[in-house]
Amino acid sequence: MTSTSSTSSIITTLGGGSGVDMIKLATDLAEARFLSQKGQLQSRSQALEARISAASTLRSQITNLASALGDRIRNGDLSPSPTLSNPSIAQLSLLPGSPGRGSYSLEVTALASAQTLASNGYAASAAPVGEGQLTIRFGTVGASSFAEDAGRSPVTIDVTGTDTLADVARKITQSGSGLTAYVAQSAGGTRLVVKGQDGAANGIVIEAAGASASDGVTPPVAGQIDYLAWSPTTDSGQRKATATDAAFLFDGVAMTSASNKVSNLPGGLVLQLTGTNAGAPAQIGFADKTTQITAMMGDFVNALNDITASLNELADPKSGELGNDAGARALKRALASLTTQVVMPNAAAGDPRTLADLGLATTREGNFRLDATRLRETLANSPAGASAMFTTGLFGVFATVDSMARSASQRTNPGSLGGSVTRYTSQLEKIDERLAKIAEQQEKVREQLVKTFTSSDRNVAASQSTLAFLKNQIAAWNAPRN
């Protein structure tokens, strides 16, 4: 801009020479030289931007449908949901992707519990416990016996001469053994409470040894490390709770669990046992989803028709931005086969396997419609099978639509909408690079023209000045003499 302004100033100083605006003339001529190329490239750029927008729109529509369907299933509106006639004994849930079907009985006779030990009394939580080591072993603790779990390493707690009851509690809790410990104030003094994990195999015994240990003849007292030792053979009331497994009857079959959470059950059921009902079995079933499925299929048909309408417009062979696009054609084929595609290959005989079984049908025009009669028949004959199609597992309605959305979004697949976006974006970037090079070339041509025209204008100005001088001389020669 400084060079241009200086040149313009020089031309103005010289009187304009030819009287022509050389700067504008150079600019106009440079633009005219590349106008055709730029116009063609800009036209192609606009077309590519329109194709990118169209492909992105279709890809977003199918992706949004999959996302909305997944959210609706995960939020419990459509997915199978177990019910229990006595909710006080357990909380029910399903493993992700489980079909959720059938009916079962549940009778809980015992809950899993953890062993709890409360030590002999101390004067205060800050009372020293004595120098030495506590060794905690794991296994099955009986009324007066202990069977150690050989596959589980014992935990060793090093205790210094200045450690207090509170220090020992902290060290046990931080040992990474799954044990928890704390100091409790009781009527009989301050006690160290040690609690294990649920399950009969998680019982514990505590051994003690070290410099402060008693002589083994006289009973230990507070301040001696073995005052904290415990075994079932020496128990004098320190055991407050016994480690036990949960026990229950599932369809009359006796089962046990080390935890109150039980997940190895038919149908993907997960139980969180919370109470007992011995002698009064409760019934497990699954909620009727007929109303929700019917409403969902209506919404599903409407969403598919919205996508179809966009696809028909954007992929129109004559007027659509994606009239000959491979990704658009792939989406058309996927939608066309949607009604007959087997979405539940693992379905039992007689259960629905395709979306057509859920009432999804097509019209002659290629749109979707809901076959209400077919849907009612499926829901009446196999309500559990229909409900099982609405999970977030490997098979079902969501898995099918999600797979379609993922395929459409693959940017490395040239036959998908994602691949189309990648291809068009790459072409657009090349056009932008070409336009940038043309702009550089145009500026070079303009600068060269400015130099040429400026030089010419100086010559014209000089000629005009010489001509004016000669005219004045001739006029002087021809003037009458007195």
Image (cartoon, helix red, strand yellow):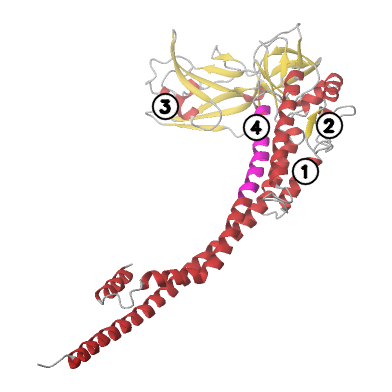
- Badge 1 marks a residue whose secondary structure is helix
Frontmost of labels 3 and 2 is 2
Q: Residue furthest right?
A: 349
Q: Amino acid at mark 4?
A: Ala
Q: Indicate which disc residue 369 carries.
A: none
- Residue 428, picture quadrant: bottom right
User: CB atoms at circles 1 and 2 under 8 Å apart?
Assistant: no
CA–CA distance in space, label 3 to label 2: 68 Å
Frontmost of labels 3 and 1 is 1
If you read the primary sequence from the N terminus, does the residue marked by circle 3 or circle 2 appear first? 3
Q: Indicate which disc residue 356 carries.
A: 2
Q: Amino acid at mark 3?
A: Asp
- The mark tally for this picture is 4
Q: Amino acid at mark 1?
A: Ala
- The answer to whether residue 213 shows anywhere in this view is no
Q: Indicate which disc residue 167 carries.
A: 3
Judged left or right of residue 362, residue 435 is: left
User: CB atoms at circles 2 and 4 under 8 Å apart?
Assistant: no
- The answer to whether residue 159 shows anywhere in this view is yes
Instruction: Point out residue 357 in the picture as x, y percentages from the top left corner.
Output: 84, 29
Q: Indicate which disc residue 68 carries.
A: 4
Neighbourhood count class around disc 2 (C-alpha, 10 Å): few under 14, some 14–19, many 20 upward:
many
The residue segment tinted magenta is: 52-73
Residue identifier under label 1: 334
